[in-house]
Amino acid sequence: AQSCAKPKYVIGMSLMTLTNPYFETMAKSAELYAAADCAKLVYYGGNMSEAQQLNQIEAFIQRHVNAIMFAPADAAAASSAVLAANHAHIPVFTIDTNVDMKSLKRAGGHIVEFVQSNNVELGETAAKEVIAYDKSALHGAPVELGWVDYPFATSVQDRDKGFKTVIDGDKAIHVVSRLNGKGTTPGGLSATAAMLSAHPNVNVIFDINAPSGLGAVDAIRAANKTGKVAVIGLSGSQQAVQAICDNSVYKAGALQDPSLESKIEVANIVKYLHHESVPKLVLTKTYSVTKANCHDMLKIAYP
Amino acid sequence: MARTETTPTPPATPSAAAPRKSFRLPPETGIFIILALIMGGMELLTGNFLTVGNISTLLVNTITIGLLAVSETFVLLIGGIDLSVGAVQALSGVAAAVVINHTPLGWPGAILAGILAGAAIGFINGAITHYVNVPSFITTFATLGVAASIPLIVTQANPIPIFDNTFNALGQGYVLKIIPIGVLIMLLIAAIAHVVLSRTAFGVKVYAVGGNRHSAYLAGVNLARIDILCFTLSGTIAGFAGVILAARLASGYPTAGSGASLFDGIASAVVGGVSLFGGSGSVAGALLGAIVIGTLTEGMDVLDLNTYWQPLVIGVVILLAVTLDTWKSGLFRTLMRRIGGAKV
Amino acid sequence: MARTETTPTPPATPSAAAPRKSFRLPPETGIFIILALIMGGMELLTGNFLTVGNISTLLVNTITIGLLAVSETFVLLIGGIDLSVGAVQALSGVAAAVVINHTPLGWPGAILAGILAGAAIGFINGAITHYVNVPSFITTFATLGVAASIPLIVTQANPIPIFDNTFNALGQGYVLKIIPIGVLIMLLIAAIAHVVLSRTAFGVKVYAVGGNRHSAYLAGVNLARIDILCFTLSGTIAGFAGVILAARLASGYPTAGSGASLFDGIASAVVGGVSLFGGSGSVAGALLGAIVIGTLTEGMDVLDLNTYWQPLVIGVVILLAVTLDTWKSGLFRTLMRRIGGAKV
Amino acid sequence: MSAVLAERGGSLALSGIVKRYDAAPVVRGIGFTLRAGRVTALLGHNGAGKSTVLKILGGAERPTGGTILLDGAPVGFATPREAEAHGIAVVWQELRIIENLTLVRNFFLNREITRAGLVDRAAMRAHVVRALAAHGLDADPDAPAGDLSPGDRQMLEIIIALDKGSRFLLLDEPTSALNASEITRLLETVRRLAAAGTCVVIVTHKLGEALAVADHVVVMKDGDIALDAERGELSEADLAYYITGHRREATPLAEAAPRSAFGGDTMLDIRDLSAGNCLDASLEIHAGRVVGLYGVAGAGQVDLLEALFGVRKLRGGRITLNGTPYIPSTPRAALARGFGFLTDDRKRNGFIPDMTISKNIVLASIRRFARGPWFDADACDIQAKAMASRLAIRSPLTMHVRRLSGGNQQKVIFAKWVTAKSRILLLAEPTKGVDIGAKAEIHGLIRELAASGDTLLVCSSEIEEILEIADVVHVFRHGVCAGQGIPRAEAEAKSLLALSL
Ligand SMILES: Nc1ncnc2c1ncn2[C@@H]1O[C@H](COP(=O)(O)OP(=O)(O)OP(=O)(O)O)[C@@H](O)[C@H]1O
Ligand SMILES: Nc1ncnc2c1ncn2[C@@H]1O[C@H](COP(=O)(O)OP(=O)(O)OP(=O)(O)O)[C@@H](O)[C@H]1O
Ligand SMILES: [Mg+2]
Ligand SMILES: [Mg+2]
């Protein structure tokens, strides 16, 4: 990488939240990649509020940033923000979660590029892990699955969709409970604790993100059900992958690579600003994490 | 003991009779000065804070919190609290979106639906609080749940896009190419609310009820009417906020106003000098409080302050601001108020 | 909406003279009956709600909100409010995690650090509120920002894992294999707080200050001491909550207690009969209020009620519960309170 | 005798004391000396600064300038607690009873009896039961003090202050809510304490009371001292002269042509009315008359007024108003039927503390001060100005009522009900805490209103007041109307008092 005395570009980045290690990593690595390309990155977390993110985009427009990186909390409500940037002739690049293209098009807005780890695929991967899970521990009992959900985020809705289509195909798996784990560790903890006491036969927990999965692990441990209940699901954080390596409660999962997403997106932004062409859509690889490959995955997993 | 006898003078003419009016700074002066200081500070730090564009963005970003501060003022003044205003935004935004997408009523119907949804929740708040005599904290906690759930149930958490440009102009359009329509509406509503509270008989009664409910009752004030009206007005204005937010986002957003923003309206009003115990404060103060909080939030973004530091800096600056506001009224008044029955 | 406002009847004969003690049901009876009704209802609906395991889970899930309700009670009783308790949890959890990972002090040091962090924020709240005479809403809004920011800055939003089993037992361990240690600590703290408020001279003064601050001052009560102690106790108990949560999560979690859970402690206390205006309510009531809210939340989960419906159902049930509690004290007392100066 | 005790018991002296609020001086560099074993009466018009002086001595306010000398040494009290530590106990004009605490807890507030860190409830309760009994206060020690009537609350406060056995006892209008026999007993107690070496200051507007109990008289006027003298040969007329600044030629009212007690139409016909402590009262009230209701606190006369105004539930009885049945429901409805009600509990429900004098005055008749939806601030100011000058409310009309002196607050409430132009005015203790000048003015207003055809029902714990203004008197005893319709011509203090006990 070259070193620059003064950044040539300013990129504004608004992420749905910064209090999830996944996005934290996305922001931090984007900052590094941007610096390497002589650009300055300014990033904010939106506390899962589309209105707050709109305000942040307005602030970017005011300070005439050269490009905007955007991970909206809500796809359908994000078109205003993109439109505002369009009016100010600032290119918008979405990451992780896209704007709802149908409404955006209808409103006459456009984005340059979208980098995503395929969320539907993540859900499907996790579902396949559940199906592939060695059920010898269950002694022939059917899989009773508890679903630690967070249905308010578009990305999670996609994961849910992917998970559901695959799981619905397996008659031996029954979803007995689906609760809101708020996407946080405390939320995952309370939801799982409630599931375990309401449905004592629950033996697999599916989680939609690593923080809530870690909460589920805590709940299982607290209920003295270690070994009886497995957690399988989105498990991108190092803590979660490490747990899989340790063959603890966390058995397997799906992983996305936020750092890679940032790397591609920043590279494309810089290209675009140099008037080079960029692809409209980049799907980054997602991974299936198992005890077998967990040590490799640790290198990808975010801190 | 010697008898010290002063010659009695005839009673001084009661000063009450004197027709001169002593000039007093309005109580909002303090918060206004603070706002000026904060803006000045931002300008010094950034070098380009006070541009027309930036101020306009700032005001646009303050629409929601400003309207919520005004709406909250009506309820705080009678000694109540309204936790539902945040969720009402979601409800009325979704109501407007549903009307525009699924009925032939178009944007006028949508606007009306949004406002009426807010008014209805407000009316329920007032009626239950008054007649069932439950603390308004509880009533509005319950309606917060109701107003937050309905949009989620209706939309299954998926925002409903709005493509009506006339409607969306409420949040995105400009008058004379420079004044955002939403800001205009906010200022208009605030001005009307200010006049209502400071110049009408209704306003006098609102302050009376908040100042001493029992005394107001004995003076013949219709408590039911005042309670219900104040809550209904609060809900109505929150409904406006929801409509404008929906127009800004071009969608009915079912989780609008959730989370910690619950507090923003109340916090703004309190920063602007409205008492949580009723009976004192003004709409102008509340609005200034909202602009202070809005400016700080905006300023943090413009200053590139790390997200993690923002709550800390905003909190500390607000504390300093209110402290200054308290002190400007002189140390003795301060001390007296501390001792003299003011609640902590 | 016609309604005749009937008025208070005082007892016909002044109960006065009699030096004998008239037997009175404790004021918490109402909320206790309501809790029983809710639990009974849940049992009917699910068929297996009242199992030892479920009750134990329920209590474990109530630890945080229960402790926050107790902590909030101290502040509400003197007519204040403490918005910082949620964020204090994050601060003290992270403090404990940092001490355990980066110092040789081990679990005792970690526990102490967590509690001290809470106490420090509480002390600051009390001192600023009292001496600077800023409404506690503002002070604690500011310290909420501070207490929420510091853990984020320290951890960069990444939870700090805690591997000390003794420490984690606080949140995960059991006494006699059946009673969760965390629940025991919560009940112990609540019991101590209840005794302190109802049986000590300090407690009498707390109620006096909340009942009428100026009168308490005239009676010679040291307002500074009461204010600062109440806020410090509130912070300390919130610190306990943070430590136990960290132990449950086996990590210092930098965003613990954020979002709408800000309200849970206050809401529990109010549901349990603690007045937002100071001077009335009890720790026992607040704890019962927390268990009511905890039971409802847990119950919704056990019933697998759709997430979107939960806020609505919880809100409505709480409203009904408090209404019932209000009515049980007799329609006339109720009306009298409504008219007689009680704030809405 | 008192001189000897004074040597032994020390003194409390003020010197050059100044107190300003927002630059407005309310005490202007005054000084006087209080000595042990003596009773000082502190007199003066409403707003003269009496309570302010007591607040300074009691540590509730800090003087802007000047010194306090305790036994000759300068002291400063930053808080009431410090004053109390120096042996000063105060009964404040704005009572400090805390309504949500029980009598016992109020009694021992900040001096709780504890055992092993916990309050000793049994010991405290036993002490309180004894103390209440000793002073004849009939009240449940475990009930919230807010349930007491204003008179009982004042009595409780006095008992608490006496219980502290302090060297200095400062009493700010302790008798304003007490009845005649309670007052007599209190004054005896004060004399006894003084004889035992206590230094007592008593603020009062009842000059007879002052002369009966005091050794030493200080009169304040607009923040200055108008008189500082031994009681000696001072007469009530002398005191009135120093207080008001002029000599008043007799009392025109009392000697005005007596009006017939009855006559005119029957305005109100009350049959067998029971409410609160009032039992089966039957009264016939004639239009254009001032009807005095006399009785000790809790005898039911105030309950009758409250019932008529719809703030106390009727247990039974019929009321006919101008020939049509009247069932009181709410104050609003009562106002609509032409009633007005001046409460005897001014601090609790008399006014809106953080509202201006003007707005408080028009609150009960706000419709008349509105043009459409608009509040007519000018009309409000004109009315307030007129009332203020008539009743000598000397504070600026934009001042919040919270900051007025007690007597001036009372005048604002009275002004509110005069402004409301009710045809039937129910007045509970209308002149509580009002100075002699304004009291005469209020009495005059009451007579004027009656002359213009209004009907007034007046409860007063002062027999003299009843005798001065009433055309006809009803006496209540234990809830029963024991003396029915005694015309003023036939009424005299002794017989009324006897009927009431
Ligand atoms: N907090 C305050 N702010 C401004 N002025 C005040 C305040 N407290 C008292 N005053 C004014 O000080 C003056 C003296 O009041 P004070 O209470 O001492 O009178 P007082 O002699 O006790 O009268 P009263 O006989 O009516 O009780 C009054 O004019 C009053 O309005
Ligand atoms: N809400 C209440 N609850 C319990 N006791 C009450 C209540 N209200 C009044 N009392 C009691 O009833 C008795 C009579 O009070 P009330 O106010 O009727 O007296 P009153 O006739 O108005 O006397 P006063 O002349 O002192 O005003 C008092 O002993 C009081 O303690
Ligand atoms: Mg006075
Ligand atoms: Mg009474």
Image (tube, coloured by chain):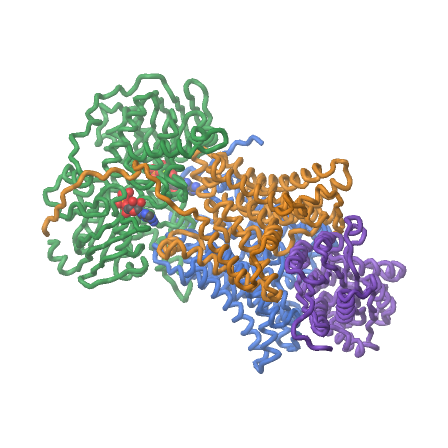
Chain colours: A purple, B orange, C blue, D green
Q: Residue furthest bottom?
A: C104
In this view of the protein, which residue sits in the foreground, A32 or D126? A32
Q: Residue furthest front?
A: A275
In this view of the protein, which residue sits in the foreground, D213 or C31? D213
Q: Is D376 placed above or below B101 here?
A: above
Residue drawn at x 34%, y 28% is D457
Picture quadrant where residue B97 is located: top right
In this view of the protein, which residue sits in the foreground, B324 or C153? B324
> Exactly how many numbered labels are in the figure?
0
Q: Is residue C134 left or right of residue A134?
A: left
Which part of the image, by quadrant, shows the C terminus of chain A? bottom right
Q: Is B95 placed above or below C256 here?
A: above
User: Residue C167: x and y, percent?
Assistant: 62, 75
In this view of the protein, which residue sits in the foreground, C326 or C309? C309
User: Residue C233: x and y, percent?
Assistant: 49, 64
User: Residue D103: x and y, percent?
Assistant: 38, 50
Residue drawn at x 50%, y 39% is B195
User: Residue B113: x and y, percent?
Assistant: 69, 39
Q: Is A40 placed above or below D215 here?
A: below
Task: Report whether residue A241 is seen.
Answer: yes
Picture quadrant where residue C328 is located: top right
Task: Report whether residue A189 is seen.
Answer: no
Which part of the image, by quadrant, shows the N terminus of chain A? bottom right
